[in-house]
Amino acid sequence: MHKKGLTLFLTFVLLLASITPVLADSQKKGTAKIVRDNYGVPHIYANNNEDLYFTYGYVMAEDRLFQLETFRRGNNGTVAEVFGEKFLARDQQMRRDGYTDQEVQKMITKMDGFSKKVIRNFAAGISLYVEEAFKDPDEKLSKEFHDYKVTPKAWTEVDVLRLFMSSMGVFMDSEQEIQNAKILAQLEKQYGPEAAKKMFDDIFWENDPASPSTLPDEGAVNPVKKDTKKAANQQFPGIERASETVTEKRNDFVAASEELGLPLKIGSNAVVIGPEKSATGNALLMGGPQYNFSAPGSVYEVGLHAPGIDIEGSGLIGLPIIMFGTKEYYAFTSTYGVGNLVDIFVETLNPENPYQYLYKGKWLDMEKRVETFTYKDNNGELKEVTKEFYSTVHGPVTLLDKENNTAYSKSWSFRGTEAQSWSAYLESNWADTIKEFHKEAQEMTMSINWYYADKEGNIGHFYTGKYPIRDERVDVRLPTPGTGEYEWKGFIKTKDHPYAINPKTGYIVNWNNRPDSNWTNGELSFMWGEDHRVQQFIDLVNAKDKLTVDDIDDINYHASYVNLRTKWFKPMLMEALEKTNDPRYQEVYEALQDWNNLNEDNNKDGMYDSPGLTIFEAWWPIVVDNLYKAQLGDAYPSLKGIIDHRYGSSLTLRALGGSNGPLKTNYQWLNEDTDRLLLTALDQALEKLEEEHGTHVSTWLKPARMMVFTNTSLVGLPQYGSETKLLEANRGSENHYIELTKNGPNGVNVNPPGQIGFIKKDGTLHTHYEDQIELFANWEYKPVLFTEQDVEKYAVSTKVLEIKK
């Protein structure tokens, strides 16, 4: 790692200082070489770490300054003063849940010396470009600055750390417990407590043993423990209205964030292959981080080269950290861990004073903070408004329900440790061995899966996070009473987190599924069931004895375009059709049989290639509606997206009798023969399709769904974003494939839409603004340029940056 080398370097410097006179300020300079390749990716060569990270900040600002400005404002709650009053509520939530400048600065002072140097130099590099842009705004400030009359400011170390803290905090955030409580209350009103509990337990199962795991045989310590004899009372007055308010605010927050191009919905997939399953005998790694498809993209690619480090890859914009990439010895990637790190506590308020709450037998005063917000009104004038925020021992108050004497506070297990996680991510870039990489994973307090593969053939998976040990009397799927009896008992030891080095399977795959067969995730349990999208990767990896990088790419292609419901439910439909021998279904059966389950438009005529797809997509929603709508009544609208979740529809699999696992349904969802339900839904779908397309099944082709890399925040600015259309895919917004050969990494990647998000004042897009979209659409890649020789081969420009000390 860097620390030992840094210590030796500093010792050497101190020895020199004792015999060398201090240089004049004008002589205190450093330099770094920036080599741009044919896709505009900067490869930085510096003589020391300080100059390296300074230059990293500089080139990121040069390429993406307006995006950096948007991200900074999005995370510090100052969006409304640029983009208008509709973003005021979002600003208020970010500051309510976030930290003051003083609090962030205090965290920075406690960081290790290396982290402080990196964060300071990275911010200084951004600021240097801002300074240059002030001197030549027409050439160095992109069009958005001029159109929105935004003046960029110098960056501080607080800006850099907060961007990580707020962005990652939003990724990990969850308020599902409140929605779950509302759903349970609705079901109890409709069906009574007994039937409601059966329904609720089916929809929000605590643990599905058949759910696919990344490390199925490794074992971990996070079983569901409950004390039902002394169960906490988790029925809260006014929960239905509270849930509606919170959900509405959450939806507005998500919509505003997406309009700004700030990533919220993250997923990501990964495949790591060990030597015994690799056709070449070398370890292989594929990563597909799934952020939003925006222009510019959410991740930034760079090559960093200085004494002690050679690394190439990409990371979230605004961070001096490589999250997906390779070093000489090993490659790495990550996916969202979907872990249960957030709890909602319901506070009991003093009827005489709604700003006091009951905690351990005493009325405590809420802490109060007043923030001032600036926003632009409809006339373009700047206005100010103040907002009061309150917090309890559990965290910020998200909702104050004075009528029912309750308040809802949000508690993040990692709160206050974000700087530690930032440093762990940074240090992972400097790790030299799998042991050092694992050590940094244990310092990470947010829920992420880290993956590793090296040239010696070692592969590894490490599940990170700070996971609370919750009171056994609490149902973790619901909010927790905040009166003090049900507090967290500590945190699961990091040594007990799921991890594996060289697992027995010989491979590691993940698509946000659970890490281990014993690991649970509370209120988000419906995301980890037997019908899970990761099964697409598992099945195809298992189908081959040995795999190449091309094989992994083919698997990724399949997973990106497959209709996920075909895994379990298409065979059920086909079997039902085979039993009928009804000639009316012959053409339908053949169309479904001929369809390869992929949403493809290979002839590029704007229509999907198979009528089987049209039939299946018309049929499946009717199956779900017919099975649940009448049963769930008023609760169905809130539950449809949970039962038929984008990860899978596991309850439906169990309800229709298709499960291979031990988990059974408690409630009788199906009141008729399974085949009858499936064929009735098919008849309804066919009737509708005949009305729309006629009676010839072969003509039942539906328009292909297309997508663009865009940022809808700037609707009035058509130059921002990209209008290039490509076939919709459930794919990583960046992809990288690395083979760890004995001679070092050999790989390819694609990071659309392009490296440089700069638009000239006259609206001209930079050459590298969207030059990777065609690669992405055609499943083609550019080489990962790791060695200096490879960089020089593809070099287009070289610049030497002078750095004042």
Image (cartoon, rainbow, N blue to C red):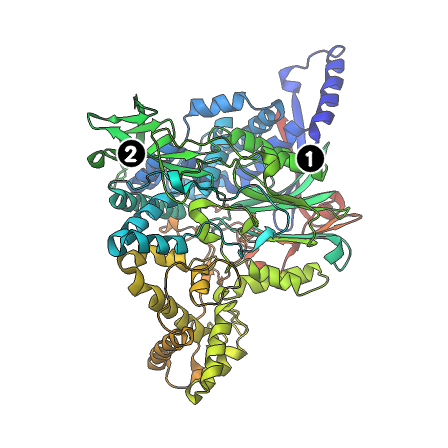
User: Which residue carries the number 1 mark?
Assistant: 436
Badge 2 density bin: few <14, some 14–19, many ≥20, Cα 10 Å: many
x, y percent for residue 165: 48, 34
Quadrant of res 369:
top left
Residue closest to the far front: 229
At x 42%, y 42%, the residue is 476
User: Which residue carries the number 2 mark?
Assistant: 407
- Secondary structure beneath disc 1? helix
Determine whether 427 is above or below 733 in the image: above
Left or right, residue 476 beside residue 403: right
Quadrant of res 677:
bottom left
Left or right, residue 741 beside residue 772: right
x, y percent for residue 805: 62, 22
Q: Nearer the viewer, residue 220 or 408?
A: 220
Q: Nearer the viewer, residue 162 or 537?
A: 537
x, y percent for residue 582: 43, 87
Determine whether 720 is above or below 474 in the image: below
Residue 556 visible within the image: no
Q: Distance between the residues labelled 2 and 1?
A: 44 Å
Q: Report the amino acid beneath label 1.
A: Glu
Task: Give the label, 2 or 1, closer to the camera.
Answer: 2
Task: Point out which mark residue 399 bears.
Answer: none
At x 74%, y 10%, the residue is 18
Q: Report the amino acid beneath label 2.
A: Ala
Q: Nearer the viewer, residue 11 or 635?
A: 635
